[in-house]
Amino acid sequence: MKYYRLWVIAFLLKFIGSAWDASYHFKYLFEEYSIPHIVNTMGFALGGILLYKEWRHLTYLDGFSRNLITIGFGLFLIGIPLDFTYHIAYGIDLTTWSPTHFIYYIATDIMIFGVWRGYYLFTWYKVPTWKSLHTWFAMFLLECLLFPNMQQENGAISYDQYIHGRSIASKEILQLISDPASQIFGGIPQYVYPLYSVLMVGILTVVTVRIFRDFTIPFTGAVLYISLRLIGKAIFAAVNYPTSYVPMTIILIPLAFLLLKRTNWLAGLIGSLAYFLSLYAIHKTGILITPPLVLWELAPVALIGILVPVINTIIKPQLLLRKSKQPA
């Protein structure tokens, strides 16, 4: 179990480094050797050591899980020079939706899934519960899936500060935000935020429930994610760094499945409606500064909420959990 706890530390370092990096680049321009990048690299390096151990002698992972993690590491390493080249060419680092950033996301998703799969097979004799490391791996995967949305979550607050003359960004950043639609919000349509959120949270919830037969794992994973985001927000505010809107209402999606004890279209519909309407109420009342929303987005949000559990019944995620070489 120490092996997988070390993986939790590795992913936690990447979690901290990524959140810090998102905040950092709403205050300062791109720097290869910034402290957030170093923290992220520390987590990546620890994961590399753990992976190297399994290549020397397969002990805690099965062969397929190890190969998945290796593919993720390889993609991440390929993304580093591509990302540097992208930012040199465009001279800007305010968007989390760039093609090279998505290489990072996809690579990290694969790594997390590989480790989570290995842990699931390694603890085959235990019934999966929220009290185990499953909650941590669910949280890490949720964070990686939702990380692109931090562009708009950071941007909403930073832009509000800017238009009210309270910006804490550097002069270099202020010179770049003359076109908020392309710089602050990443050049993507504003309606992407709620649609992407309900899609990612819905997929992770129903697939996790289907594989582990436990409704509490995705719920507690979301609770852990929101808690860590709130802690990070408090720390950033204390040290005068840009903060972001914390997507607290995503918890209503796995909560709907947990309360109904079903992964059907009704649970998806109720969860997606509750998520959007509560987020819209927060936005309209101005209690918190949220990414921009308009009411018509409720329709596609509800449709996605219905379709995700329906499509989930068609695919067969269990195939990815078949054992290859049994770990010692």
Image (cartoon, helix red, strand yellow):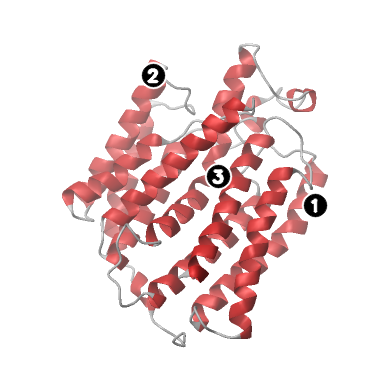
Going from N to C along the chain, the mark reached first, 1 or 3, is 1
Percent across and percent down for residue 139 are 43, 52
Horizontal side of residue 92 vs 144, given as left or right? right
Which residue is the site of mark 2?
284
Please give left or right for residue 216 compared with residue 142 in the image: left
Helix, strand or loop at label 3? It is: helix
Label 3 crowd bin: few (<14), some (14–19), many (20+), radius 10 Å = many
Write the residue at 41% across / 26% down: 294
Q: CA distance from mark 2 to mark 1?
A: 40 Å
Judging from the image, what secondary structure is the residue with disc 1 in?
helix
Task: Tell me the residue that label 1 is attached to.
Answer: 85
Q: How many marks?
A: 3
Q: Amino acid at mark 1?
A: Thr
**Residue 186 location (% of width, % of height):** 62, 36
**Mark 1 residue crowding within 10 angstroms, few (<14) / some (14–19) / many (20+):** few
Mark 2 vs mark 3, CA separation in Å:
23 Å
